[in-house]
Image: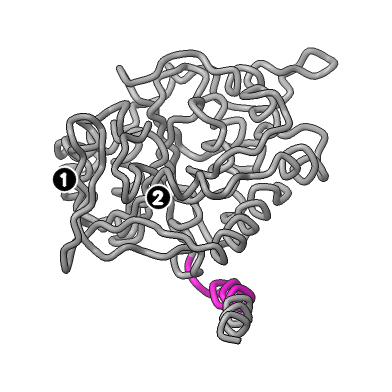
Amino acid sequence: MRNMIRNRLVTLLALLLPCLAMGAQPVSVIFDTDMGNDVDDAVALAILHALESRSEARILAVTITKDNAEAAPYVDLVNTFYGRGGIPIGVVKNGKTPEPAKMLHTPVTARDENGALLYARHVTSGSELPDATSVLRKALASAEDGSVVIVQVGFSTNLARLLDSPADAISPLGGRELAARKVRLLSAMAGQFPSGKPEYNVRIDIPAARKVFFEWPSPIVASGFEIGLSMKLPASAVDRDMMAWTKHHPVADAYGAYQKMPYDRPTWDPTAALYGVRPEYGYFGLSAPGRILVHDDGRTTFEAAPGGKHRYLTVDELQKARTLEAMVQLATQPAR
């Protein structure tokens, strides 16, 4: 009986919250991604665009931590596909994982029957774009105080460099002070809880991850490896739902290039994006407040502490069903 009542209340809440959110200001989002290392980054970006189309979010900038020249053109063509080709993009310089990626190369180089690029874009190579640090500083400097949510789904390289950035012509504030004034939440796909096993986003740039988790001034909520692993985006969402309204889709093309279809893929990065914009929807639970520690071998451990600025996501079976349904719905929403 209790479970029946709880299920009905959760369903009612899910119906009411979008209506209540309609009058709210869109969440200002900066998306920091290692686009190209896994296809779930592309799904997370599609979800953010869907949320912007619903007036729930506004993408201020996309910054990239994968040091590959095709990462930025792919981000730009996805943004253009969704009608937002003007979103500023910043790239990491002398960063990690420069290796080529089929999920980038295939849609970036795809051409139609007339030989023209299949996906319109404004960026030819990441080498022509500004450093991510300056793009982060500009986006934050122009934002209202306490308004920005950063969704970090790659390495901590860019945010660590932001913290070290000095005052300049963009802002009289150093990077740490700028983040403290402008950012209200860092939603990061990072770590593994409570096991503490080394996780890819942390392990690839351990010094940067340690710096961010030790020095970042705003609250941090981590979506650990175990969260996305427990909810997999079904192949049908890509080859059926995503393609139901368009002949060509850059996220579907990335999926097909990343791995032979059909396959279900964990939703690591989409969970961080979804929580960053809709933290009040009850999709996830939260740990007690405390502090996330990054160790020399890339492990992450959590120490509970009253008043701590760090928490990590949890999810139960009921939440898994609702959350996966929301991610599928948003990821496959038609561009408009």
Q: Which mark is residue 59?
A: none
Q: Secondary structure at mark 1?
A: helix
- Number of numbered discs overlaid on the protein picture: 2
Q: Badge 2 is on which residue?
A: 223
Q: In the picture, which quadrant includes the N terminus?
A: bottom right
Membership of 20 in magenta stretch: yes
First of labels 1, 2 by sequence position: 1
Up-down relation of residue 14 to residue 269 (above or below): below
- The percent coordinates of residue 132 (x first, y second) are 34, 31
Q: Residue at x 28, y 38 (%)?
A: 159
Estimate how packed mark 1 is, as few (under 14), some (14 to 19) or many (20 or more) residues with alpha carbons within 10 Å. few
Q: Secondary structure at mark 2?
A: strand
- The percent coordinates of residue 236 (x first, y second) are 75, 42
Which residues, given as a range, are shown in magenta? Answer: 13-25
Q: Position of 47 compared to 311: left or right? A: right
Instruction: For the residues labelled 1 and 2, say whether their Cβ atoms are less than 8 Å apart.
Output: no
Q: Position of 256 compared to 322: left or right? A: right
Occupied quadrant, residue 45: top right
Mark 1: which amino acid?
A: Phe
Camera-side residue of 133 and 19: 19
Camera-side residue of 123 and 292: 292
- The percent coordinates of residue 101 (x first, y second) are 54, 18
Mark 2: which amino acid?
A: Ser
Q: Which residue sits furthest right? A: 113
Membership of 261 in magenta stretch: no
Occupied quadrant, residue 211: top left
Q: Badge 1 is on which residue?
A: 214
Q: Residue at x 61, y 30 (%)?
A: 77
